[in-house]
Image: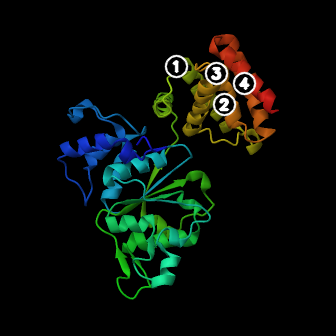
């Protein structure tokens, strides 16, 4: 793991998964490594009522029903589609589920406008084909085909960003559970083994880019992941991810609770302003997601560590927030300037403390970018 920039969940939590597997006496569908109950515990963390001899930390923060329905869907041999706004943790949940079920979350296809049918079925090693002809040896299976042959979970990220041809190719895989290889005379069908399924993710803001056909929708069970609106839950997510960042970079830096409160309050204010806006020009281009909050905090922490005195200060946080959210000029800068004068300035006068430094740091950042 020390040689990896980012270890997949099955490597990062290998010891924990080994322990859960050793004490798991529950029924397991197909060739699953853990039972549905233990998968839920792995994802959401353990409770005293679970009766385990060790505490399992929570890794995904959301409603238990979303996780349970996702697990039940995969146990029923249907595809799972996690859909929601950016930053709601869809990909992280998909990775955790794949790690717990298959101990392999890396069989992933990334959906883009350039994704082709070959990316979800197979392609050919051209040099081997020229030398020896087409054979199973010269075939390059896709991550989805590998998942079929191994009887594990395959993942498809950003499904609605891929074209209709690619989406249509998934229909036969999800319904027939095999892939034909017409170029071969023998051994020309790859059958899915028990345990194979697909977890796909889709961004709800991409509606209209490449809408799913009704035929493909019938092959998936939909689980909609809502935006986190509970401030306590959002604080837990941001704190969890920030602690991971600090460990990864081996940074010793305290996150003052007051600065986390300022960050959460600022995003809540900006979301409220976006909700009441009457046109797109009055909204920030940013989705103001939890993931973007984490990005703002990460930027501020690294800046404090490398260019500051290794203390996270309000003015640094303000500069990171402005720099991260001001994507359009002059529209986003005008919105942030209005927020700073109309909300942050009165609050700094009323509450004082770190809000005053946050006010000055934001003003300077806006002035620099204007």
Q: Earlier in the sequence, mark 2 or mark 1?
A: 1
Residue under pointer 3: 308
Label 1–label 3 contact, CB within 8 A: no
Residue under pointer 4: 362
Query: What residue is rendered at 59% in x and 25% in y?
Result: 305
Label 4–label 2 contact, CB within 8 A: yes
Q: Earlier in the sequence, mark 4 or mark 1?
A: 1
Distance between the alpha carbons at the discs numbered 3 and 4:
17 Å
Disc 2 secondary structure class: helix
Label 4–label 1 contact, CB within 8 A: no
Q: Earlier in the sequence, mark 2 or mark 3?
A: 3
Distance between the alpha carbons at the discs numbered 1 and 3:
19 Å
Residue under pointer 1: 257
- Give how far across and how far down residue 290 sits, in percent: 55, 37
- Give how far across and how far down residue 211 sits, in percent: 58, 63
Q: Quadrant of the image for the N terminus?
A: top left
- Give how far across and how far down residue 343 sits, in percent: 70, 22
């Amino acid at each position: 793991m020390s040689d990896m920039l980012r270890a997949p969940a099955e490597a990062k939590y290998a010891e924990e998964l080994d322990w859960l597997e050793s004490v798991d006496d529950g029924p397991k569908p197909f060739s699953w490594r853990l039972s549905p109950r233990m998968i839920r515990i792995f994802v959401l963390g353990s409770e005293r009522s679970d009766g385990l001899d060790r505490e399992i930390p929570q890794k995904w923060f959301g409603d238990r029903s979303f996780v349970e329905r996702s697990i039940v869907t995969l146990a029923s041999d249907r595809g799972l589609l996690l859909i929601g706004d950016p930053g709601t943790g869809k990909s992280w949940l998909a990775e955790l589920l794949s790690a717990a079920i298959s101990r392999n979350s890396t069989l992933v296809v990334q959906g883009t406008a350039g994704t082709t049918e070959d990316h979800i079925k197979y392609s050919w090693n051209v040099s081997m084909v020229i030398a020896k002809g087409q054979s199973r040896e010269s075939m390059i299976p896709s991550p989805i085909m590998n998942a079929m042959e191994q009887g594990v979970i395959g993942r498809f990220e950003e499904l609605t960003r891929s074209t209709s041809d690619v989406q249509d190719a998934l229909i036969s895989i999800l319904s027939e559970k095999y892939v034909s290889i017409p170029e071969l005379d023998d051994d020309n069908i790859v059958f899915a083994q028990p345990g194979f399924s697909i977890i796909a993710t889709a961004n709800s803001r991409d509606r209209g880019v490449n809408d799913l056909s009704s035929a493909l929708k019938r092959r998936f069970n939909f689980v909609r992941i809502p935006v986190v609106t509970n401030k306590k839950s959002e604080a837990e997510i941001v704190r969890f991810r920030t602690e991971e960042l600090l460990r990864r970079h081996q940074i010793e830096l305290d996150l003052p609770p007051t600065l986390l409160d300022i960050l959460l309050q600022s995003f809540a204010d900006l979301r409220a302003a976006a909700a009441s806006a009457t046109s797109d020009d009055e909204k920030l281009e940013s989705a103001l997601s939890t993931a973007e909050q984490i990005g703002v905090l990460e930027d501020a922490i690294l800046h404090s560590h490398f260019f500051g005195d290794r203390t996270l200060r309000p003015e640094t946080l303000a500069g990171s927030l402005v720099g991260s959210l001001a994507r359009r000029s002059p529209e986003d800068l005008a919105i942030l300037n209005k927020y700073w004068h109309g909300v942050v300035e009165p609050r700094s006068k009323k509450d004082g403390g770190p809000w005053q430094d946050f006010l000055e740091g934001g003003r300077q950042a806006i002035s620099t970018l204007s």
